[in-house]
Amino acid sequence: MKQHYYMTDDIDSVEHISDDLHELNINDDHIHVVGRDIDAIEQHHIHLARAIDETDIVRSSERGTLLGIVMGVLFVWGATTYQPFGFEFSTISLVMISLLIVGICAYWGGVFGTYFDNYRISKFHNAILAGKFLMMVDTRKDQESPLKNMMRKRHPEASWMGKDSTIANPFHA
């Protein structure tokens, strides 16, 4: 799936766009709106973006998992090569400790990610703080062309800001 980004100044425009997206069989689970005025978004019954959409939890958890895998491998290598605690670990102990290391790193990566904007929408941070609304619309391949046509014809007030994959990329800078 692809995620399309549209920016608009007016909450009424967001509501009309949302209604038109429903006509294209794009349901609320695939429409995410980010804005400073959360009350206005809720009053218009528009699908508000979740914390997982707004923050970098997913990407940071993935990075934590990768770090945990590296640390787990290093632990296994060190424990089997040097036996730093004076005894030999069983295979199951090494696996369990490695999984614990991976889990802890993934958890703390996710916690760390809550403090940052999602890397995909961080470039829109200032516009959102200025009162604009960002609509993120997830589409299948067959919905992309109808979406672009509908937005161009019915909603010229909404600026197309680009598109990206819906899959988080832990290696994105």
Image (spheres, rainbow, N blue to C red):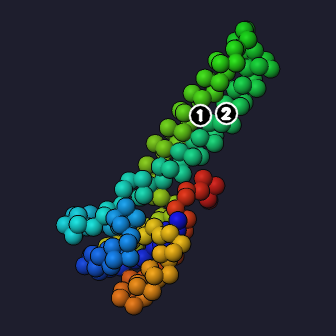
The label nearer to you, 1 versus 2, is: 1
Q: Residue at x 48, y 64 (%)?
A: 122
Q: Residue at x 76, y 26 (%)?
A: 77
* Distance between mark 1 and mark 2 Cα atoms: 8 Å
Q: Is residue 69 visible?
A: yes
Q: Is residue 32 visible?
A: no
| Residue 55 drawn at (x, y percent) | 44, 55
- Upstream in the sequence, badge 1 or badge 2? 2
Q: Residue furthest right?
A: 81
Is residue 56 shown left or right of residue 72?
left
Q: Nearer the viewer, residue 77 or 151?
A: 151
Q: Residues within 10 Å of mark 1 (few under 14, many from 20)?
A: many
Q: Which mark is residue 102?
A: 1
Q: Residue at x 60, y 29 (%)?
A: 99
Q: Which mark is residue 71?
A: 2
Q: Are marks 1 and 2 in contact (CB under 8 Å)?
A: yes
Q: Residue furthest top?
A: 86
The mark tally for this picture is 2
